[in-house]
Amino acid sequence: MSQDNAEFADFFAASWDPCLRAVAASTGNMTLAEDQTAEAFARAWASWHKVCHHPAPTAWVVRTALNAGASWWRRRSRETPLAHHDVGTADGAGTGLDAPLLAAVRRLPDRQREVIVLRIFLDLDIDTTARHLGIAPGTVRAHLSRAMTALRSELAPASTTEIRR
Amino acid sequence: MNHDEQSNDSVLTRELRDSLSGLDLPGRPPLAAITTRGRARQRRRLAAFGGLGVTGVAAGIALAVGLTGASGAVPALSAGSGSAGGSASGTGSGPIQTAAFTLTSNGNGTDTLTLSLTQMLDPAAFQQALERHGIPALVKTGTFCWSSPSPGDPRRLGVVSVPLPVMSPGPGVTPVPGGMKVPSPDQLAVRTRTVINPAKVPAGAELFFGYTTEDRAVFFDLISTHSYTCGRQPPRR
């Protein structure tokens, strides 16, 4: 195994679960997330010489997976009016994806959701999140603040109970 | 941000991370599945740059490599009197099993096709397998072919039927009375048994199978053997 392949193997072993969790939480569909994440890792492998220098390769994988999913749905709706056949849209039950908090994250505006995924799900710092999204660190903080406010307001009873304990 | 908001945010952050760590994840696929998929992608891109057809490149992808797909299961690769690994060479109509499909004779003139698509479908191997089973067919990747006028609806003519699921249907696939619900335009359902009756193919017609690499889906239709049109999108019905 070459050094590149060994590096990718280490990255894959360490990052598969976090990336799949982030993609699944964003899409709400474990089957689709698994396929999108595999596709994103395949693309990362094919472009590893570039991806390995990315400030946050896991963020690259997650974003690539989500973009692959978005284009999948766009193509699907444009070209083929098919029934939901191989890939379902609601397989969250039993996997934990139907948790109210994750469902609330999926209802956030795109940019706020991206910030939540990168900053909280992938535990990237503000600067790395900002570099990855191509926005200023202050903008990341603003999106994060708005997202947290929105989540708090959606889940007010549960959070309040938690804090009073 | 005041102290209460900071406290709320840290609680919320912890709850978010707890929700995430509580997800029930399927197993990690083998590295080989990822690298092979990546390699196939590289080949497709090279083919596109080099002006080669995608079909020719896909045909070069060996089916003998075991991969996992969404289900995470490693598919068996075997062939009865057919070929090993699914290259579908030789003669006879023995069962042919590859990582992408299984084709078996039912002994009554019909054949059962089961798509697994845990690996990219090799159109050349698929077409060879169909030919070996006496099923007149045209298989293409990334394109859809149809005839106008159409030789007929393959399901109504009894050429193709999808009676029962054989594997776990999987999320989003709901068995319905009388068989699986097949969408229109016709898409072969993954993880179900599709029965093909070549005797019902009208004279001068053949089955068309169109494989989309990105969706990993297979569409089918009847076309006139010597008169058909192909395009990048399936015809609307």
Image (cartoon, coloured by chain):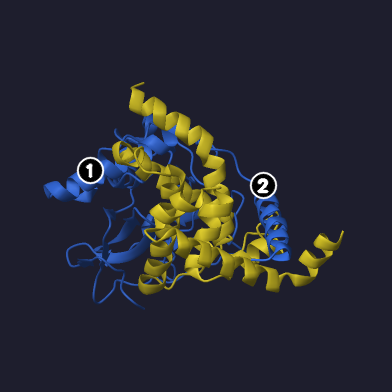
Pointers 1 and 2 in contact (C-beta within 8 Å): no
Q: Which chain is yellow?
A: A
Quarter containing the N terminus of chain B: bottom right
**Chain on which label 1 sits:** B
Of the image marks 1 and 2, the number of the one nearer the N terminus: 2
Tag 2: Cα neighbours inside 10 Å, few (<14), some, or many (≥20)? some
Type of the residue with mark 2: Ser
Q: Which mark is residue B21?
A: 2
Q: Residues within 10 Å of mark 1 (few under 14, many from 20)?
A: some
Q: Which one is in front, A39 or B113? A: A39
Q: Quadrant of residue A164?
A: bottom right
Which quarter shows the C terminus of chain B? bottom left
Q: Could you give the CA–CA distance between mark 1 and mark 2, rounded to whole angstroms?
A: 40 Å
Q: Amino acid at mark 1?
A: Val
Q: Identify which residue is drawn at 71% across, 62% down.
A: B3
- Give the residue drawn at x 37%, y 67%: A75
Q: Position of residue B150 (x, y in %)?
A: 28, 74
What color is chain B drawn in? blue
Left or right? Give the position of A154 relative to A115: right
**Among all residues in the image, which is located at the extreme left?**
B51
Q: Dot 2 lies on which element?
A: helix
Q: Pick whichever, A61 or B223, lies toward us.
A: A61
Q: Residue at x 34, y 72 (%)?
A: B152
User: In which chain is the residue bearing label 2?
Assistant: B
Q: Looking at the image, which is closer to me, B62 or A122? A: A122
Which residue is identified by label 1? B57
Q: Secondary structure at mark 1?
A: helix
